[in-house]
Image: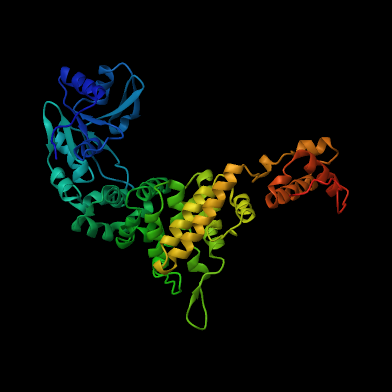
Amino acid sequence: MGMRIRLPEKVRTILGQLAAHGYEGYAVGGCVRDSLLGRMPNDWDITTSASPTQVKELFSHTFDTGIEHGTVTVLLGTEGFEVTTYRIDGEYADSRHPREVRFTSSLREDLRRRDFTINAMAYSESAGLVDLFGGVQDLERGVIRCVGEAEERFGEDALRMLRAVRFSAQLGFEIEERTAAAIQKLAPALKRISAERVQAELVKLLESPHPDWLRKAWETGITAVVLPEFDRMMEQPQNNAHHIHSVGEHTLETLRQIPADKVLRLTMLIHDMGKTECVTQDEKGIYHFRGHAAYSASIGKKVMKRLKFDNETTARVSRLVANHSLYPEATPEGVRRSVRQIGEDLFPLFLEVKKADVLGQSPAVWQAKLAYLDQIRRLYEEILVRGDCLSLKRLAVTGNDLIRDGAKPGPELGKILETLLDEVLECPEKNEKEYLMARSRCLRNQENSCGSGKCCI
């Protein structure tokens, strides 16, 4: 692992300006960690002995990001860099924020307040790498370990417990034994953390290379506090020919099988939550989960509302969850009707959901179910190539067309449009304006036949 880090030019400019005026300055935290791992940092944070006021005097374009905690953002061109004064945190009031911070001239004091050893390293070209707590060794061992006493660090900021699991999943690292034990002991403190903060860490975990390491959050008692629905899934057996896992273990496997997309990963997390609510057992001891997709969608909406997800994400995930048990008829018409039901925007994601769901089931069912999905995908691709009408917006007539032809605005107009679309889904060749206008008149006049002669071939 190389100890020399290539700093971006603008970071060198900031550090150089600080040094020219007698202040210490270092790149610090995640950017150092990622650089040592050979990854491209998302951003570059800087720590310095200069006070916020002194930082503002040195740079012409700054704004106060969190000046009460010592942070000033320095703008160089269009890029912003957070520059934070060395500090010591005071007593923590809410398991998240210190009541006060004290500025210090000691880099060591600043680094020792940070969460994990791999995030408590600093670097400058003049001083090289400053690693006072074994961060490099933990990177090499692949370990998430708290700086100092784990219970102390988690007592200061309870969100760090969820961050430990998130970093573990992102980096493929194990959580050090004492750090994991402290999480198990202190996990209930996560109740005091805001839903927005929990959501942000959960999404990062789910989007990581190891989303199934959500299991670590379950093993350490985190999900019992922030996502109790998952604990119930882990406890729910399935005991039928399609499954060899509990609902929870099946969910973890589906997370592993689906692309790293926020909506897709959230869909797989939620897709079977309803099974704990609708499970029945027949006389042979076989478990059934009839209607579980609707139950799951309902529970998922509540979970996403509780965790403060935005409306668009909630709506997309809910639609996929509600339809994940749908098995389109393997015909062009069957696929067209399914696209209409699920939505043109979500149907490609629906196919990904179906595939992941299958791969989380018993290997005994894979071959037949995957062959069926391949057939559905081929039919869908053929439909796209042909340009078949799949929604009202692609119908050859609009509501305004029908109104100009004598139809009255209102619910009846909507019903006529839906009837026309239904006919076109069955027979795409009918999507011609002349035929649809004539058919609309027949529907308005309650006639059985329009006599237009334009029928589906």
271 to the left or right of 61: right
**Residue placed furthest toward the front:** 457
Where is residue 1 shown, x and y percent of the image? 14, 40
Q: Which residue corresponds to the image point at 24% horizontal and 38% vertical from the top-left?
A: 34
Q: Nearer the viewer, residue 299 or 293?
A: 293
Q: Which residue corresponds to the image point at 55% horizontal and 69% vertical from the top-left?
A: 290
Q: Nearer the viewer, residue 36 or 150?
A: 36
Determine the image quadrant of residue 448. bottom right
How has the structure been colored for display? rainbow
Numbered marks: total: 0
Q: Which residue corresponds to the image point at 29% horizontal and 34% vertical from the top-left?
A: 69
Q: Nearer the viewer, residue 1 or 330?
A: 330
374 to the left or right of 33: right
Q: Is residue 45 in sight in this rendering?
A: yes
Where is residue 295 shown, x and y percent of the image? 54, 62
**Residue placed furthest toward the top:** 60
88 to the left or right of 261: left
Determine the image quadrant of residue 49. top left
Q: Is residue 315 in sight in this rendering?
A: no
Determine the image quadrant of residue 334. bottom right
Where is residue 286 shown, x and y percent of the image? 48, 78
Q: Looking at the picture, does residue 77 appear above or below residue 155?
A: above
Where is residue 75 shown, x and y percent of the image? 33, 22
Q: Nearer the viewer, residue 443 or 167?
A: 443
